[in-house]
């Protein structure tokens, strides 16, 4: 399976360089998700802009990524869902209501940064409230 990974401090962008995400490629994608997660990647953006076809195995791999990052309070964001057949499959399977999907990579990065900031501010507010309760 061809892909690239660009790592940043708060996230990584995985761009698939395959037109098909099918039963042949899906197991490899799941394995790569596990490797990235074990490397400590806090948030992952999966860019599908080159992908033209996804089957049920591909959807299962995408859901595996979503579960891996959601289980650890991380973020998994899908972007580049531009091909009509991929869009339609995600909509028909109702995954658009389960997955965080952004139109493009810059939008996904911005969303992750905002969610991270919101989480940090919420944690600080909780810590301040706990200190006030102790006094």
Image (cartoon, rainbow, N blue to C red):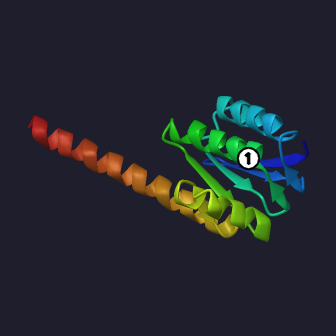
Q: Residue furthest left?
A: 135
| Residue 80 shows in this picture | no
The location of residue 35, given as percent across then percent down, is 73, 31
| Residue 95 shows in this picture | yes
Q: Is residue 92 above or below residue 3?
A: below
Quadrant showing the N terminus: top right
The location of residue 28, given as percent across then percent down, is 82, 35
- Left or right of 46, for residue 63: left
- Residue at 41% in and 57% down: 118
Q: Is 60 or 70 nearer to us in this picture?
A: 60
- Residue at 60% in and 44% down: 66
Q: Is residue 129 above or below residue 83?
A: above
Quadrant showing the C terminus: top left
Residue marked by disc 1: 56
Q: Secondary structure at mark 1?
A: helix
Q: How many marks?
A: 1
Q: Is residue 134 above or below residue 62?
A: above
The location of residue 54, given as percent across then percent down, is 79, 54
The location of residue 25, given as percent across then percent down, is 86, 41
- Left or right of 98, for residue 132: left
| Label 1 Cα crowd, 10 Å radius (few <14 / some 14-19 / many 20+) | some
- Residue at 77% in and 58% down: 48
């Amino acid at each position: 399976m061809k892909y690239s990974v660009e790592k940043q401090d708060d996230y990584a962008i995985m761009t698939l360089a395959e037109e098909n995400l099918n039963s042949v490629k899906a197991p490899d994608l799941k394995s790569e998700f596990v490797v990235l997660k074990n490397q400590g990647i806090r948030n992952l953006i999966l860019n599908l802009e080159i992908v033209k076809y996804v089957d049920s195995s591909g959807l299962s791999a995408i859901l595996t990524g979503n579960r891996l990052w959601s289980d650890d309070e991380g973020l998994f964001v899908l972007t580049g869902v531009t091909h009509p057949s991929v869009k339609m499959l995600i909509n028909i399977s109702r995954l658009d209501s389960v997955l965080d999907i952004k139109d493009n990579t810059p939008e996904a990065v911005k969303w992750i940064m905002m969610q991270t900031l919101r989480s940090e501010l919420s944690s600080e507010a909780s810590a301040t409230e706990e200190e006030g309760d102790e006094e």
